[in-house]
């Protein structure tokens, strides 16, 4: 499996963790609403960034 695909899958995992954290207000410990929302958004943005970098790197490798 290409390392860029793995990076994309890991990013998707972070994205899912962000949604879970935001929705259930739980990440290892119970979080209040604002902390859960902020941590969830952070995970979602980081996951989207990782997916974007994986796709960009994959396309760059395909050109070369």
Image: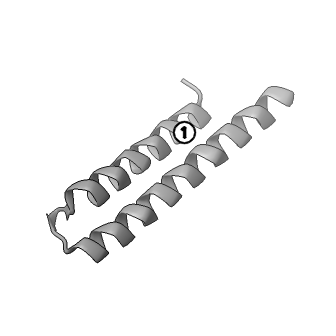
**What x and y, as percent, mark residue 8?**
54, 39
Q: In the figure, 49 relative to 13: above or below?
A: below
Give me the residue at 19% from left, 71% from top: 31
User: Looking at the figure, which quarter contains the N terminus?
Assistant: top right
**Residue drawn where x is 30% and y is 76% of the image:** 34
Horizontal placement of 18 versus 63: left or right? left
Q: Is residue 14 left or right of residue 30?
A: right
Q: Quadrant of the C terminus?
A: top right
Residue 25, horizontal then vertical, whole percent: 21, 62
Is residue 59 depicted above or below 53 in this figure? above
Picture coordinates of residue 52, whole percent (x, y): 64, 46
Which residue is identified by label 1?
8
Q: Residue at x 59, y 28 (%)?
A: 2
Q: Position of residue 5 (x, y in %)?
A: 56, 32
Furthest toward the right, the residue is: 64
Number of numbered discs overlaid on the protein picture:
1
């Amino acid at each position: 499996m290409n390392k860029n695909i793995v990076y994309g899958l890991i990013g998707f995992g972070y994205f899912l963790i962000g949604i879970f954290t935001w929705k259930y207000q739980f990440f290892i410990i119970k979080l209040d609403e604002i902390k859960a929302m902020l941590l969830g958004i952070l995970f979602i943005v980081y996951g989207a960034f990782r997916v974007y970098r994986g796709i960009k790197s994959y396309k760059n490798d395909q050109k070369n």
